[in-house]
Amino acid sequence: MKWILKLYPPSWRARYGSELAEHLSQEPFRLRTAADLLAGAADAWFNPGNIPKTNEPQGVSLMIKAARCCSSEFSTKDSLKSAGLMIGVTLILTAAAVTLDKTIGDHYAIQALTYAAFFIALLVSSNLTYLRPYSSTARYAIIGFGSVGWYLFFLAVTWFGTRI
Amino acid sequence: MSPKPDNLDAFGRFTEPAVMILVSLADQPRHGYAISEDIEQLTGHRPGPGTLYGAISRLETRGFIQPHSVDGNRCTYELTAAGCHALKARLDAMARVTRVGMDRLQMA
């Protein structure tokens, strides 16, 4: 029944989501309860003024959170570190691609690295946010295979681009 | 002398659950599930979780209740001074209605 909580507004979930999830874990599934939750979700959307203000970060950090679609399950410090890591890795990979381009010459594999840089960086930076609940093995597997996957995807795209 | 308005009427369909929550918190802080159980013991009817938290959010927004402590994922709530005042005003009004109703029933 916890899936119904996803229908509530994010600000509502940030404030009451975890305790209501705990509450629901003690309740047996009933259609009446599900209907009550649906009505509660509709009420929360139509009456946002009834959601207490939380100590959510404002200004720049809030913009960073919004831009990265972060939930409030990790701190502003984590979000900032993650954003820094994302920018850093993107710059490093892009610089590597530019260097390779200058030394080796124009090649679709290098172009693929340029395109994949941001997406790989996004995965790496998720290590501090979304991937945090997972074990370190799972995180490294997701980041490793995900990065290779992104690179292969762009490799295929750029290769195809050279053929048309 | 008429009591001060307690603002609970503005809660619409959440008014009754809100009063029950205030009654539940009148003697001690409780978390959501304990409030729900207490209301069930008191009235024989358990409020749905959507209704319960709709009422809790309204009470908290208006400063009638506030978080007392957090135990894991569970937040315990307590009455504020405004909440005590609102509950007392509501119970006084209900007591008057009850008294008048009982008197009229005896006259009938």
Image (cartoon, coloured by chain):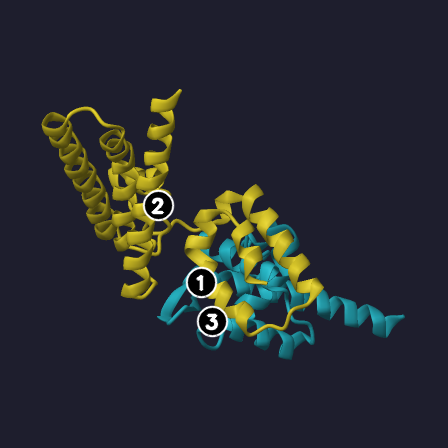
Chain colours: A yellow, B cyan
Q: Amino acid at mark 3?
A: His
Q: Which residue is mark 3?
A: B31
Residue closest to the eye, A123 or A15: A123
Q: Is residue A67 above or below residue A82?
A: above
Q: Amino acid at mark 1?
A: Ser
Q: Is residue A92 above or below residue B66?
A: above
List the single residue furthest toward the bottom: B41
CB atoms of marks 3 and 2 within 8 Å:
no
Give the class, few, some or many, for how many residues have Cα within 10 Å of label 3's Cα (few <14, many ≥20).
many
**Percent of width and height locating residue A23:** 52, 69
Chain on which label 3 sits: B
Q: Which residue is mark 1?
A: A18
CB atoms of marks 3 and 1 within 8 Å:
no
Left or right of A67? Residue B40 is right
Label drawn at residue A36: none
Q: Is residue A92 above or below residue B26?
A: above
Cα–Cα gap, marks 1 and 2: 34 Å
Instruction: Give the structural element (helix, strand or loop) at label 2.
Output: helix
Q: Is residue A46 above or below residue A19?
A: above
Left or right of A135? Residue A87 is left
Left or right of A94? Residue A131 is right
Instruction: Give the structural element (helix, strand or loop) at label 3.
Output: strand
Earlier in the chain: of badge 1 and badge 2, it is 1
Q: Is residue A57 visible?
A: yes
- Mark 1 or mark 2: which is in front? 2
Quarter of the image where the N terminus of chain A is located: bottom right
Residue closest to the eye, B38 or A162: A162
- Mark 3 or mark 2: which is in front? 2
Q: Which residue is mark 2?
A: A149
Quarter of the image where one finds residue A83? top left
Q: Name the residue located 35 percent from the left edge and 47 percent from the top edge.
A: A70
Q: Name the residue located 42 percent from the left edge and 56 percent from the top edge.
A: A15
